[in-house]
């Protein structure tokens, strides 16, 4: 399994994260997205005409949408990440996978604009990104009232992994995450999962480790 | 702003290999400028009202100045040393003071918390005493004999090592780091942070490296450095005040911060205060 | 006597080891809960390099800055500097603290010294907080309800008695900490949550029209 990868891409990170959480070894092929623009070269366009990353390759199968890659990787290596097979949960997971495209199109765009100077209608991206975060916050309140900790149910699924990175990286694009207490607690739950890995802008939870040394004593 | 000594300094405004004839607009200390290449392939930089600015093409980047530089662009002798790979890491924009970006680059004590398991890790947090001086003959800030334990110091490093560092500040928004070179003991890898001040609280950072590393693919080298700098970015955008406080009292340094103390003193001495705050607000 | 407590969050939204940023009377604060459950409100700024402490992490009864790991004890006193693990930090390294208290599932903060305990909200249970991009005056106008002495705005949402604790934020924004009548079923609470979204929508639309 090969992932054509960019260290700063939330959509690539989702795939790396699921692989880490399921203990799956995937081969990473770094793509010079910035500054090189390698994903727009003929070699890459031949693999993915839309000129985007991630690109995922396994045994002749090529997938280029992060939600599709998450679905495939989960089915192959950790089916519990797909959720249970009730119609409700399948619907919910599919709902959030589709929703995550809105996050990429708003927060994702604002982020590469503010960080890497890529063109974007920045005010429109921020407005749409804020709307997305409000919808996630409201959904998490509903989930809590129904007794569930995660987006699609009472356990983490690829729905959470699809929406978690952009929800944390919004400040990179000038979108505040301060007003969303439920998102804050949910992203902490994701970061506390065994096997969790970080990406730049998404810190690990240092509080999971004990203080490494004694407190110097005051005399 | 005419008495601003920072106007007469050199600043990076683009990567040489990325220049186009139509060029691109950017901002230098609040002034809109246009960076392009002419028919002969040479970089040209002009202000909005058509004033041509002085230009240097060096260290992979285009350098310019809004004023009249009294000094030639600083020298990095290692840039011409055979066998080194020169890496243009690519621009990253940060909503912070250009001086805070440099100061963060001079700091090692944050490695275990911001670059966890890469440049540092608990419990190896101690910063040993090192030496700092303002070298009067070259008018640069230098920190030497800096040592720190690193789990993965470079892309080419396997496992943890104690890494040696030297830091050098040859210009107010430039920092050069010399660091243990795992494949070539005795030599130093060169990692720089070139900072373009766009406004007092907004900058573009152009990291550049000159490394002895024949093994690691170029893209891996770029990604490693981008990963490190982007971990810093979320810190830099959340420091209060946004401007670097030059007067003592606003922030509390310790022995580990000697480089920062010298840098701030040097900035103040030269009146390099664009991006700084002099009186505690 | 004007009330001097400001509601900043629901207790449930700041469980042990969680830090949140907030603003009270223009002061940027980090509100956090220790592992044993103690709630605190501090200036949101590490004295070392000015990093926001709301990005920090909680171990035991101390809050640490994410930048260099400096940790501060319950009193706001720096207790450990990882770069110098054996050093006893001087007393001068201290984070300014405010008074925080909890009452009926709400976290209250005051910037003044006070003998008065935070207000009680008998008969109500906390639901959720949400931020509205309008000043408090627009919310009172839209809801046609005045703000009471404790910063409380009483109204019916989805046919259920509700109480909104109003926290003014900089930039003409307002946080609303919503409580519903005790005993409201989860399903009805979900309806109130949606009604709150609608109230926000109305207030922001009103603001744009104005």
Image (cartoon, coloured by chain):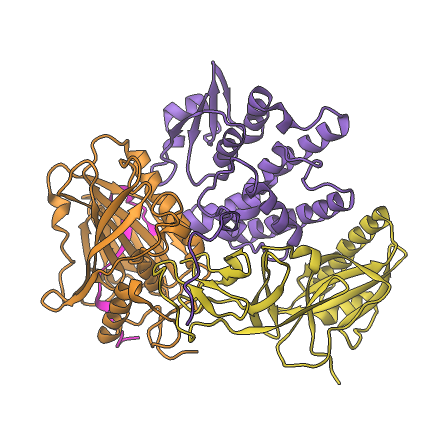
Q: Give the quarter of the figure containing the N terminus of chain B.
A: bottom left
- Stretch of the chain drawn in magenta: B1-24
- The residue lying at 45 percent from left, 25 percent from top is A26
Relative image position of residue B45 (x, y in whole percent):
25, 55
The reply to whether residue B172 is in sight is: yes
* Residue C149 or residue B65, whichever sits in front: C149
The hue of chain A in the figure is: purple
Q: State the yellow chain.
A: C
Q: Quadrant of residue B146?
A: bottom left
Q: State the orange chain.
A: B
* Residue A216 or residue C48, whichever sits in front: A216
* Residue B103 or residue C109, whichever sits in front: C109
- The residue lying at 83 percent from left, 48 percent from top is C186
Residue B18 belongs to the span the image colors magenta = yes
The reply to whether residue B32 is in sight is: no
- Position of B87 relative to C129 (above/below): above
Q: Residue furthest bottom?
A: C1
Q: Residue furthest front?
A: A219
């Amino acid at each position: 399994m090969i992932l054509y990868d960019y260290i700063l891409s939330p959509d690539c990170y989702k795939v790396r994260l699921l692989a880490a959480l399921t203990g799956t070894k995937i081969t990473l092929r770094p793509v010079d997205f910035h500054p090189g623009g390698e994903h727009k070269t003929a070699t890459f366009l031949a693999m993915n005409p839309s000129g985007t990353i991630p690109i995922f390759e396994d045994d002749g199968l090529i997938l280029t949408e992060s939600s599709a890659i998450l679905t495939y990787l989960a089915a192959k290596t950790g089916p519990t990440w797909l959720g249970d097979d009730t119609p409700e949960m399948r619907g919910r997971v599919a709902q959030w996978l589709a929703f995550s495209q809105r996050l990429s199109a708003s927060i994702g765009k604002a982020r590469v604009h503010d960080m890497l100077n890529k063109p974007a209608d920045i005010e429109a991206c921020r407005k749409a990104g804020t709307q997305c975060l409000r919808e996630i916050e409201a959904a998490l309140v509903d989930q809590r009232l129904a007794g569930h900790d995660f987006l699609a149910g009472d356990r983490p699924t690829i729905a959470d992994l699809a929406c978690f990175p952009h929800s944390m990286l919004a400040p990179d694009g000038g979108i505040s995450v301060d007003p969303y207490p439920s998102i804050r607690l949910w992203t902490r739950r994701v970061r506390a999962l065994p096997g969790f890995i970080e990406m730049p802008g998404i810190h690990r939870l240092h509080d999971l480790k004990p203080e490494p040394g004694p407190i110097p004593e005051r005399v | 702003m005419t008495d601003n000594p920072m106007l007469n300094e050199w600043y990076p405004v683009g990567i040489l290999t990325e220049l186009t004839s139509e060029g691109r607009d950017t901002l230098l200390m609040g002034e809109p400028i246009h960076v392009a290449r002419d028919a002969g392939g040479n970089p040209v930089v002009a202000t909005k009202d058509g004033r041509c600015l002085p230009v240097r093409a060096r260290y992979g980047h285009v350098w310019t100045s809004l004023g009249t530089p009294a000094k030639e662009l600083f020298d990095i002798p290692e840039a011409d040393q055979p066998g080194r790979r020169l890496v243009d890491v690519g621009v990253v924009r940060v909503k912070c003071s250009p001086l805070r970006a440099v100061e963060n680059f001079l700091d090692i004590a944050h490695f275990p918390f911001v670059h966890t398991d890469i440049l540092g890790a608990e419990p190896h947090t101690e910063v040993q005493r090192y030496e700092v001086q303002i070298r009067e003959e070259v008018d640069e800030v230098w920190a030497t004999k800096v040592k720190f334990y690193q789990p993965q110091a470079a892309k080419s490093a396997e496992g943890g090592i104690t890494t040696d560092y030297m830091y050098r500040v040859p210009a107010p928004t430039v920092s050069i780091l010399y660091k243990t070179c795992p494949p070539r003991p005795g030599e130093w890898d060169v990692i720089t942070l070139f900072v373009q001040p766009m406004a007092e609280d907004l900058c573009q950072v152009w990291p550049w490296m000159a490394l002895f590393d024949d093994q690691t693919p170029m893209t891996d080298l770029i990604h490693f450095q981008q990963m490190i700098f982007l971990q810093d970015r979320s810190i830099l955008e959340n420091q209060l005040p946004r401007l670097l406080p030059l007067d003592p009292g606003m922030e509390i340094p310790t022995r580990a911060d000697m480089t920062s103390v010298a840098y701030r003193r040097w900035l103040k001495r030269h009146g390099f205060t664009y991006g700084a705050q002099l009186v505690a607000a | 006597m004007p009330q001097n407590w400001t509601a900043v969050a629901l207790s449930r939204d700041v469980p042990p080891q969680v830090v949140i940023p907030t603003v009270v009377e223009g002061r940027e604060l980090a509100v956090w809960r220790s592992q044993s459950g103690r709630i605190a409100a501090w200036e949101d700024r590490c004295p070392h390099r000015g990093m926001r402490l709301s990005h920090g992490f909680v171990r035991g009864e101390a809050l640490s800055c994410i930048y260099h790991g400096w940790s501060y004890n319950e009193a706001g006193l720096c207790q450990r500097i990882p770069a110098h693990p054996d050093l006893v930090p001087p007393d001068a390294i201290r984070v300014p603290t405010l008074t925080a208290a909890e009452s009926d599932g709400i976290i209250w903060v005051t910037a003044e010294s006070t003998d008065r305990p935070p207000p009680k909200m008998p008969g109500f249970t906390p639901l959720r907080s949400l931020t509205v991009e309008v000043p408090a005056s627009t919310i009172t106008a839209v809801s046609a309800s005045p703000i009471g002495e404790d910063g409380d705005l009483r109204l019916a949402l989805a046919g259920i008695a509700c109480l909104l604790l109003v926290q003014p934020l900089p930039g003409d924004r307002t946080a609303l900490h919503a409580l519903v009548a005790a005993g409201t079923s989860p399903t009805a609470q979900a309806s109130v949550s949606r009604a709150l979204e609608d109230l926000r929508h109305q207030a922001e639309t009103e603001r744009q029209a104005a």
